[in-house]
Amino acid sequence: MKKKIITAVVALSFLTLNISCGDDFVDRTPPYSIDSENYFNSKADYEQALIAVYDMLQSTYQNVLLGEIASDNTLCGGESATDTPGFQQVDNMSHTPVNPQVKNIWDWMFAGVNRANYILEFKDKTDFEGKEQIIAQTRFLRAYFHFELVKWFGGIPMKGDARFKLGDETTIPRSSAEDVYASIEADLLFAIENLNPGPATQQGRVTQNAARALLGKAYLYWADLGDGHPEKFAQSAAVLETLIQSNAYTLVSNYDTIFENNNENNSESVFEVQYTDAEGGSFTCLQCSEGNVAVGFNGPRGYAGPLYDPGYSFNIPTQETYDFFEPGDLRRDAAILNIVAWQAAHPEVTYSQGYEHTGFYNKKYIPRKGDLNIPDQNLTNPNNYRSIRYADVLLMAAEALNRGGLDDVKARTYLNLVRQRAFGDANHNITASGSALTQFIFDERRRELVGEGHRFFDLVRTGRAGAEIDGFVEGKNEVFPLPYEEIQFSNGNWAQNPNY
């Protein structure tokens, strides 16, 4: 049986190589070894360690999938009510501290933090040209993982620029959410200051504008934290305005093409998590897949027909989500597959109805034909995750400008840029101001970003989750519980989130 990984919080990741030589080989005394303490002797060592940090981004497929299921956009689906109980519980808001999928998010995001901290712990060991670029990318990635953790769990333990080790869980306290956002801010400001301007030198690499976009997003979340921090709206608007005025991005003219495999890293992509169909994992190690596992989970069960491959029928949009789109909105049929209408147009299509079948599937991240899918069709899909799109940036800037009382004229401009692409004309522009404009921005975020894992957290941060999500308990479900094992390991050092 595979040895149980405790958690990234208490794991010490290191590489050890020992070569013992017999009489027929050259004797080396002491044996050659590379471990965590004598690594980082060259630029190549830092680069390899950085690639390992990037690698943990691929496990965020579950954050997207489960974040969407938690919202009012979709139902869990699957084969039956007992298919992946952890997903079903989150959908019903009945999850407890014993939930394997929630625990995966904790484990995998902390693994990303720990890998980043490994580099930062030894950032001063070896000097070479271009090291500040590596450190800046590392700090962006740590901020990215910290942002995921604080969204899901609230305050978390942090250890600065050092790896967690065994025993830390009993001595290092949980930092407040405020402190986590302050750390995210510091990391991203460093990244903005030190990353080279312009496009990435390699697809998938962090850019200066990606750091601006994530910082603007973090400020929005921070603005709604606790009793509120209205000054953060101005900070969000300022950093996002810098990104917009850089003219580095444009909206893809045809929304229907944004999520196709041949249109990845496009003019609208601010930051994408890169996936490939050439190397997969298995159900014993889903995070080991280099493909987007969520895509296979989204596919129609037992599907046979043109364009799409079958999947496990999870994360199925509701009728209410489908109907939320306005007449003439071109995004609806680009974002949601209506299987009944599709079958009517293609009579050769067959499929099986899964649990909670609505007739709708997440078309943005649905398996497509023609992929290699090595070695598993459902676990190794190449669809990149569009983590931050320019449309999202425009809507975040509109929200910050409006909710911060800064500039409703400019807020409407950014909102209407998104709507003009959605309808193909300017006849659906919004003219409202104040709180009415705020609601239009909220509604537009739902339509524009449906299926991308943002809705639950948008509802929570703006205090609307209790009214929109069935089973949501205010004062409890704004965050998820720390895994039961973490509370046990900490020996009482970490308190559980309220009401779990």
Image: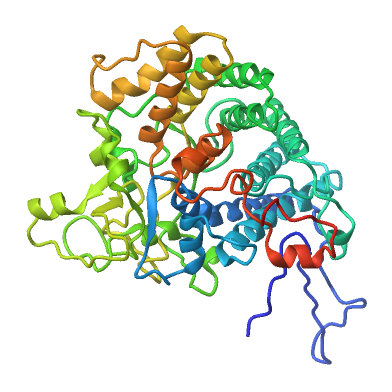
The residue furthest bottom is 23
Which quarter of the rendering shows the C terminus?
A: bottom right
- Report the number of discs: 0
Q: What x and y, as percent, mark residue 198? A: 55, 26
| Residue closer to the observer: 29 or 96 | 96
Q: What x and y, as percent, mark residue 473? A: 56, 48
Q: In this rendering, does residue 313 appear at all?
A: yes
The residue under the point 83% across, 71% down is 33
Q: Measured along the vertical axis of the image, is residue 398 above or below residue 335?
A: above
Colour scheme employed for the rendering of this structure: rainbow
Q: Measured along the vertical axis of the image, is residue 73 above or below residue 191?
A: below
Q: What x and y, as percent, mark residue 285? A: 55, 70
| Residue closer to the observer: 54 or 397 | 397
Residue 491 lies in quadrant: bottom right
Residue 103 lies in quadrant: bottom right
- Drawn side of residue 257 relative to residue 268, left or right: left
Which quarter of the rendering shows the N terminus?
A: bottom right
Q: In this rendering, does residue 37 appear at all?
A: no
| Residue closer to the observer: 457 or 134 | 457
Q: Measured along the vertical axis of the image, is residue 190 above or below residue 367?
A: above
The residue furthest right is 29
Q: What x and y, as percent, mark residue 322? A: 27, 42
- Drawn side of residue 83 relative to residue 162, left or right: left
